[in-house]
Amino acid sequence: MRRVSRGPAVLMCAALIGCGGKGGDGGGGPVVPPPPPTLTFKCSDSPQQPDQVVLRCGVRLTEDVWQIDVMIGAHPTSDIGGFAFDVLIDPMVLKYVPGSAVSGSMLFQDGEVPLLSVDTAPGDPGRLVVGIYRTGGAPGIAVVPGTFDRIMVFDVQALPGAQFDPDPSHLRFDKTRSEALDSSIQHQPIPSITFSDQILLSNQ
């Protein structure tokens, strides 16, 4: 009678048991799905035109915070003494970062420190009320494009899960309450300087 050796068969069976009885499944553990993509708070804008005040993208400070620059285009005369304006911030997607507002270079280019007042309106967190003025009878000044054209800066933070529409309504001026002012004691409006909305925010 022919004797059949069982050694190779036993070794093969042991190898299969050691691999879980299957081949090429990587151990058969649960598959962990990849994390969802991280949304990035983005900002886009367009440059200011002569006699135009606009909101522009400054610097992205963190994943959800942008510095916003208030800029002015070229103005032909040296009669600017200040600005008073309201910025409407959509409270469904954004909030103003308290204490972030700082004067820009435009109003103190000659060393005269302007008075800056910035706060949200009582009971209305979506309205940022801004006043920035040269004081003490300081003379009016001119815009120097590229050097002295930043009025002020402030920061906005995107709320968690914010969904932005493709229009500038989330961050804009209230044009009925926004004026450039001359250097007279009464700080009279300068009608030739207007305010324009052209900043777009998104989460992508």
Image: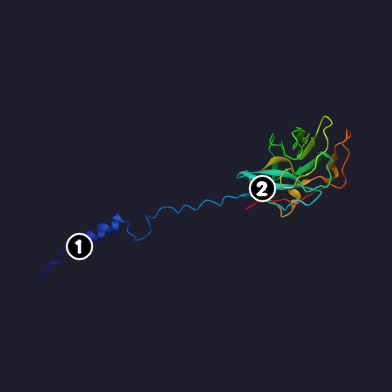
Amino acid type of the residue tagged 2 in the rendering: Ala
Q: Which residue corresponds to mark 2?
A: 162
The quarter holding residue 15 reads bottom left
Tell me what residue is drawn at x 21 percent, y 59 percent: 10
Q: CA distance from mark 1 to mark 2?
A: 64 Å
On screen, residue 44 above or below 116: below
Left or right of 102: which side holds 50?
Answer: right
Numbered-mark total: 2
Instruction: Where is residue 164? Give x, y as percent.
Output: 69, 51
Instruction: Where is residue 150? Give x, y as percent.
Output: 73, 43
Q: Residues within 10 Å of mark 2 (few under 14, many from 20)?
A: some
Instruction: Where is residue 85? Give x, y as percent.
Output: 81, 41
Which is more toward the observer, 193 or 98?
Answer: 193
Instruction: Where is residue 26? Give x, y as percent.
Output: 38, 56
On screen, residue 105 above or below 38: above
At mark 1, the secondary structure is helix
Q: Residue furthest top?
A: 136
Amino acid type of the residue tagged 1 in the rendering: Pro
State which quarter of the image contains the N terminus.
bottom left
Is there CB contact under 8 Å for labels 1 and 2?
no
| Earlier sequence position, callout 1 versus callout 2 | 1
At mark 2, the secondary structure is loop
Which is more toward the observer, 2 or 200?
Answer: 200
Q: Nearer the viewer, mark 1 or mark 2?
A: 2
Which is more toward the observer, 192 or 165?
Answer: 192
Q: Which residue corresponds to mark 1?
A: 8
The quarter holding residue 148 reads top right
Which is more toward the observer, 13 or 183?
Answer: 183
Q: What's the colour scheme? A: rainbow
Residue 158 seen in the current view: no
